């Protein structure tokens, strides 16, 4: 779907399946930024807006169906339709809120607190995604996730 240094020219609506966006460091270690599935959107919004090269990969985790909204067509819809203009504003607001919440969680919560919050707010993650992907999303190693899960199960 997307690989650096390509420019992201789409917003994808996921009809079925699941997709992740992630960053790869110099040692080829992948860190998940987003895990998305049915009825959710995914994009590299920074690249989409700035039209600068992406630093993220966006790839399917499993097979599914996606509807692509390309940048040019979306801007035409924004210019000609109040409905689509409102849609764009609402999507932008949601992206901002999700990004702010995720940043705050990564900065201010411990790995255990992030795990518990994910378990409480998005329990379906644990049926949909592998523990390897969840650990990466939480910013920890799979071994750390295993330790956290073991500690919590004892309490």
Image (cartoon, rainbow, N blue to C red):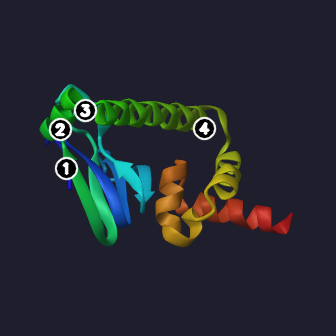
Does the CB distance between marks 1 and 3 fall below 8 Å? Answer: no
Q: Residue at x 29, y 41 (%)?
A: 44
Does the CB distance between marks 2 and 3 fall below 8 Å? Answer: no
Q: Earlier in the sequence, mark 2 or mark 3?
A: 2
Instruction: Tell me, for residue 144, which label it has, or none.
Output: none
Does the CB distance between marks 2 and 1 fall below 8 Å? Answer: no
List x then y, in percent, for residue 94: 46, 36
Instruction: Tell me, for residue 81, which label it has, or none.
Output: 3
Q: CA distance from mark 2 to mark 1?
A: 17 Å
- Disc 2: which residue: 71
Q: CA distance from mark 2 to mark 3?
A: 15 Å
List x then y, in percent, for residue 143: 58, 63
Give the quarter of the image for residue 123.
Answer: bottom right
Q: Earlier in the sequence, mark 1 or mark 4?
A: 1
User: In front: mark 2 or mark 1?
Assistant: 2
Of residues 99 and 130, the one drawn nearer to the viewer in this rendering: 99
Label 4 sits on a secondary structure element that is: helix
Q: Earlier in the sequence, mark 4 or mark 3?
A: 3
Q: Is residue 1 above or below residue 71?
A: below
Q: CA distance from mark 4 to mark 2?
A: 30 Å
Mark 4 surroundings: few (<14), some (14-19) or many (≥20) residues within 10 A? some
Instruction: Tell me, for residue 3, which label it has, or none.
Output: 1
């Amino acid at each position: 779907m997307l690989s650096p240094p390509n420019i992201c020219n789409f917003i994808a609506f996921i009809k079925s399946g699941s997709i992740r966006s992630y960053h790869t460091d110099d040692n080829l270690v992948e860190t998940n930024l987003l895990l998305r599935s049915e009825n959710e959107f995914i994009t590299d919004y920074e690249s989409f807006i700035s039209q600068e090269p992406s630093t993220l990969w966006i790839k399917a985790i499993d097979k599914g169906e996606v509807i692509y909204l390309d940048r040019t067509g979306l801007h035409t819809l924004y210019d000609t339709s109040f409905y689509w203009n409102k849609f764009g504003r609402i999507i932008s607001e949601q992206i901002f809120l999700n990004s702010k919440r995720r940043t705050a969680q990564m900065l201010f919560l411990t790995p255990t607190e992030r795990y518990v919050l994910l378990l409480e707010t998005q329990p379906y993650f644990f049926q949909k995604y592998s523990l390897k992907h969840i650990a990466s999303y939480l910013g920890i190693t799979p071994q750390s996730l295993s330790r956290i899960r073991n500690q919590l199960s004892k309490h």
